């Protein structure tokens, strides 16, 4: 498989990840509105959504690329985090200080992509 085809599969995996993220975060927003959930529960829901989304995207990429699947899952996880951080910067016009939770979330996303790739 050529690099361009691999990158197309990564793009499709990212697309699947972001569609999943959008749907689940919309449901989470509805739940927050209806049930007045606490901040810790909301943060957990967001982080869990990111991890499952990268797991799904990594699974898709691994299933279609079929070689060095864990590596392509890692690539997907890194790109997923890069897009999230870039979007956050564009909306907020600043990057908050690097916090432990942000680093942990990034590592979980990369790990989720890698695990999905290995399972794919």
Image (cartoon, grey):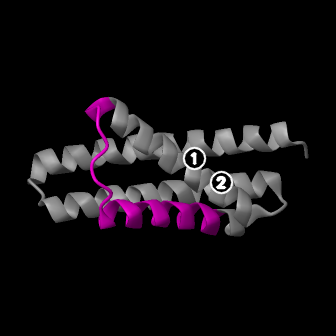
19 part of magenta stretch: no
Prevailing secondary structure class for the magenta stretch in the rendered image? helix
Residue at the location (31% across, 64% down)? 101
Quarter of the image for residue 113 reads: bottom right
Question: x, y (%) of residue 116?
Answer: 63, 64
Disc 2, disc 1: CB below 8 Å?
A: yes
From the viewer's perspective, is 42 left or right of 1? Answer: left
Q: How many C-alpha atoms fall within 10 Å of the one at disc 2: few (<14), some, or many (≥20)?
A: some
From the viewer's perspective, is 84 left or right of 41? Answer: right
Give the residue at mark 2: 75
- Which residue of the protein is positioned furthest toward the right in this rendering? 1
Question: x, y (%) of residue 117?
Answer: 68, 62
Nearer to us in this view, 93 or 26: 93
Residue at the location (62% across, 69% down)? 115
Labelled disc at residue 79: 1
- The boundaries of the magenta stretch are 91-116
93 part of magenta stretch: yes
Q: Secondary structure at mark 2?
A: helix
Question: x, y (%) of residue 59?
Answer: 66, 59
Q: Is residue 120 visible?
A: no
Q: How many C-alpha atoms fall within 10 Å of the one at disc 1: few (<14), some, or many (≥20)?
A: some
Residue at the location (49% across, 60% down)? 109
């Amino acid at each position: 498989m050529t690099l361009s085809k691999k990158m197309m599969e990564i793009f499709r995996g990212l697309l699947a990840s972001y569609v999943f993220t959008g749907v689940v975060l919309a449901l989470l927003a509805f739940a927050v509105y209806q049930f007045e959930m606490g901040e810790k529960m909301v943060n957990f829901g967001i982080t869990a959504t990111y991890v499952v989304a990268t797991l799904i995207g990594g699974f898709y990429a691994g299933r279609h690329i079929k070689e060095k699947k864990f590596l392509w899952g890692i690539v997907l996880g890194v790109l997923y985090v890069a897009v999230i951080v870039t979007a956050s910067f564009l909306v907020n016009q600043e990057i908050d200080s690097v916090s432990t939770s942000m680093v942990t979330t990034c590592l979980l996303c990369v790990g989720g992509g890698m695990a999905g790739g290995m399972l794919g």
